[in-house]
Image (cartoon, rainbow, N blue to C red):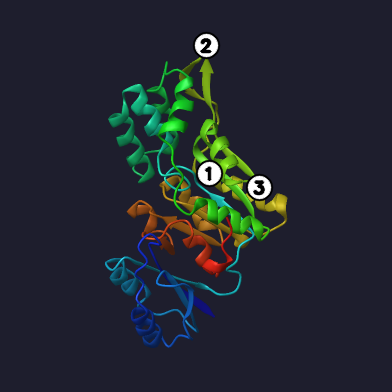
Amino acid sequence: MYTATLLCDPASPTLDPALVESLRNAWGGGDALWLAPDEAAEFALDTLPDNQWQVWDDLQGTGVDLVIQKTVGRRKKMLLADMDSTMIQQECIDELAEEAGVGARVKDITARAMNGELDFDGALTERVGLLKDLPESVIAKVLAERITLMPGGPTLLATMKADGAYAALVSGGFTAFTEKVAAELGFDENRANTLIVADGKLTGEAWRPILGRQAKVEALEQITAKLGITEADVMAVGDGANDLGMLKRAGAGVALHAKPSVAAECDIRINHGDLTTLLYLQGYSRDEFKG
């Protein structure tokens, strides 16, 4: 048994009931259940439709995301989340680079690395090197003035944790940012790279080993083992090439507003909804949201 979920941007809820009914009838689905009026609906399916991705592509042009999952085990016991451009709306290293006067150069490297065009470790090393001699105090300035949470994040964390889920933030960014974001959102733990500071300035280096793609997979393995749960019990979310390992291993790997090359390798692709989408995918209705 499968569940098809249709979603749109909650800031502009325009999911047409006629569209939901038309697709449900075409696929011989069960009765539609509305998780939020004009925003999210689901229905049961006996089998996977042959034209799933063609319909997905057609719906993208109307601002609607479509996800089909196995019904059993949809509600997860753990959230494993990337930070940059996932739980926050920015890339922290790009914001630091702006303050250092090398914004354009670093932003280009970041985009290519997240799209899988560059080796992540090498790209991070090069970008951190460009931050050499930046005052450590700039980190607090960037946190206060440039970093904003991704819409839906507080609700996602509050709802899953109220239901007993564990939440881990794993980032190829920096602990100076993950520690604050994790605390603000209620993550149980966070892992990231650590910038080296000497005499109040960044040295242009990060502690080794660098936390990249494989380290995120290891976090998935280590934390599930610690909790005594399986990887199928995990919902992972990210947007970049360094997230693909954990997205493919988790029971539900969500490519959220991801780079096209990343989304193409994932079965759950969200381009219009915010982070509350991850709750709808687990069968939560808006009435059940916390926070």
| Residue 6 horizontal side relative to residue 57, left or right | right
Secondary element under disc 1, as helix, strand or loop, is: helix
Vertical side of 188 occupied by 250: above or below = below
Q: Earlier in the sequence, mark 1 or mark 2?
A: 2
Secondary element under disc 3, as helix, strand or loop, is: helix
Q: Earlier in the sequence, mark 1 or mark 3?
A: 1
Q: CA gap, disc 1 to disc 2? A: 32 Å
Please state which amino acid type lies under the numbered disc 2. Answer: Asp
Vertical side of 78 occupied by 31: above or below = below
The residue positioned 41% from the left and 47% from the top of the image is 240
Q: Which residue is mark 2?
A: 199
Q: Camera-side residue: 89 or 246? A: 89
| Residue 78 horizontal side relative to residue 53, left or right | right
Q: CA gap, disc 1 to disc 3? A: 12 Å
The answer to whether any part of residue 125 appears in the image is yes
Q: CA gap, disc 2 to disc 3? A: 35 Å
Q: Which residue is mark 3?
A: 222
